[in-house]
Image: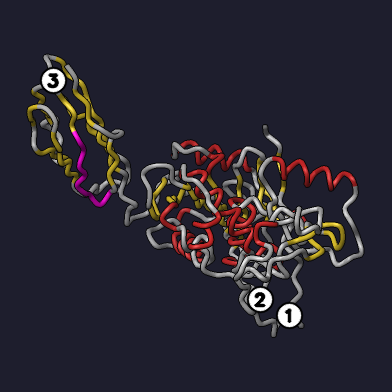
């Protein structure tokens, strides 16, 4: 005797919905919803042999997930089938450590983006308060840029509350100390750091996800310019993104977030800027670049200018991709390292990733989603192929350093 409900246990969105499941059976079966559960119904409640059931769940008014085990009676035996509904993102103040859904697009194999704050105090965590506003601004900045814009349906986005005692961040170079949840610090220039293990721990406490297939955006409630991404060889990362308000590149919170989280943290891309000095990488830098390339990082820089051998050789000669070539300078060096296009987000934070960078991002999206990458499908969906023109009218009076290179941690 056989009975099965095809598909995994069911997860519903918090707003409520109806899902169908196929029943495969060779005899009489019955399904019972526990009498104390008034938010879930199943129709029909029984049948003979194969059939279709409709599972209906009403809206969840609570911030936490809820579950129910359906009782299934077949051939004198009882088994259960679990229904899960996500928590309501809420309309009131957060509790410290609370996770809320910003946007959920996939039930299976999603790309998870986690936004968590440092330097936000308790009163900043009201519904649509300072933290929510910062998350919304950052999310929309990222998804205005290709290829994130065209692949948004692959992403689930979460917000996590972390209460700090003081707003802002520590300035190590100015001997200013602020008591924040993760101790985020400006170290001079544009370099920043944080207690990433504490960040990982906080996320693991409230989300059952694979950190190595996710990106954490740490929004720092401080307007000083800076930004740094901590990148691990197994894939996890923390992109430190302050709420900088300088209106010209490479400044601006949204621009920093796209560079740090979209470029480094998820895309695993290298910086493409140079140090403006006549320098070439020494043997240790070459070895470092080759090591991380072997881990699947840095598809947007190479040690050769040979267009038949360069990492992005598949773009050479393609119609629509005439901007792709070999341009000397990148990874912080003026000579000996080449980048694919004249300008890109990984240089001055403009909202544009060059073609090989877009391909690298798409490959990772599809890998996490369990889908196969093909060049044909990539090109069909690749809609922005030239860098936008950016005005620099204020650059004569404002000079900012490039964002600090990522901190690389080999944890394999």
* Callout count: 3
Q: Is residue 132 above or below residue 293?
A: below
Tell me if residue 314 is in the magenta stretch: no
Instruction: Tell me the residue that label 3 is attached to.
Output: 74
Label pair 2/3, CB-CB below 8 angstroms: no
Q: Residue at x 44, y 50 (%)?
A: 158
> Within 10 Å of the Cα at label 2, are there few (<14), some (14-19), or many (20+) other Cα atoms?
many
Q: Which mark is residue 395?
A: 1
Please report whichever mark, 2 or 3, sits nearer to the chain's N-terminal start.
3
Label pair 2/1, CB-CB below 8 angstroms: yes
The local secondary structure at tag 1 comes to loop
The local secondary structure at tag 2 comes to loop
Residue 32, visible in the rendered structure: yes
Q: Residue at x 56, y 56 (%)?
A: 219
Q: Is residue 140 above or below residue 73?
A: below
Q: Residue at x 43, y 52 (%)?
A: 154
In this view of the protein, which residue sits in the foreground, 399 or 337? Answer: 337
In this view of the protein, which residue sits in the foreground, 114 or 144? Answer: 144
Q: Quadrant of the C terminus?
A: top right
Percent coordinates x, y for residue 145 in the rendering: 53, 66
| Magenta-drawn segment | 14-22
Instruction: Tell me the residue that label 2 is attached to.
Output: 248
> Within 10 Å of the Cα at label 3, are there few (<14), some (14-19), or many (20+) other Cα atoms?
some
Please report whichever mark, 2 or 1, sits nearer to the chain's N-terminal start.
2
């Amino acid at each position: 005797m056989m009975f099965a409900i095809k598909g995994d246990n069911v997860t519903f969105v918090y707003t409520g919905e109806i899902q169908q499941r196929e029943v495969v059976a060779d005899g009489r079966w019955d399904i019972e919803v526990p009498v104390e559960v008034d938010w879930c119904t199943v129709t029909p409640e029984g049948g003979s042999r194969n059939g279709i059931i409709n599972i209906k769940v009403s809206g969840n008014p609570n911030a936490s997930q809820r579950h129910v085990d359906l009782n299934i009676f077949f051939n004198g035996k009882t088994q259960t089938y679990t229904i899960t509904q996500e928590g309501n993102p809420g309309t009131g103040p957060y509790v410290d450590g609370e996770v809320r859904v910003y946007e959920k697009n996939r039930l299976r194999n999603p790309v998870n983006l986690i936004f968590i704050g440092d330097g936000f105090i308790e009163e900043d965590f009201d519904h649509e308060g300072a933290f929510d506003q910062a998350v919304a601004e950052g999310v929309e900045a990222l998804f205005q840029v290709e290829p994130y814009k065209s692949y948004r349906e692959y992403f689930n986005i979460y917000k996590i509350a972390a209460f700090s005692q003081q707003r802002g961040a520590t300035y190590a170079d100015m001997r200013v100390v602020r008591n924040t949840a993760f101790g985020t610090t400006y170290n001079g220039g544009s370099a920043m750091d944080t207690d990433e293990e504490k960040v990982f721990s906080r996320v693991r406490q409230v989300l059952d996800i694979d950190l190595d297939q996710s990106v954490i955006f740490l929004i720092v409630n401080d307007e000083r310019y800076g930004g740094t991404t901590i990148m691990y060889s197994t894939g996890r990362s923390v992109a430190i993104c302050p709420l900088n308000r300088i209106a010209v590149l490479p400044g601006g919170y949204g621009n920093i977030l796209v560079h740090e989280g979209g470029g480094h943290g998820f895309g695993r891309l290298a910086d493409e800027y140079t140090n403006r000095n006549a320098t070439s990488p020494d043997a240790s830098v070459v070895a470092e670049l080759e090591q991380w390339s072997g881990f699947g990082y840095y598809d947007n820089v190479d040690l050769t200018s040979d267009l038949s051998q360069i990492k992005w050789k598949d773009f050479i000669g393609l119609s629509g991709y005439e901007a792709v070539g070999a341009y000397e300078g990148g990874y912080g060096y003026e000579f000996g390292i080449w980048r694919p296009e004249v300008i890109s987000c990984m240089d001055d934070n403009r909202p544009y990733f060059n073609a090989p960078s877009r391909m690298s991002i798409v490959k990772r999206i599809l890998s996490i989603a369990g889908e196969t990458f093909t060049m044909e499908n990539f090109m069909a969906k690749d809609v922005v192929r030239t860098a936008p023109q950016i005005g620099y009218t204020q650059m004569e009076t404002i000079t900012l350093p490039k964002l600090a290179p990522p901190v690389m941690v080999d944890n394999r």
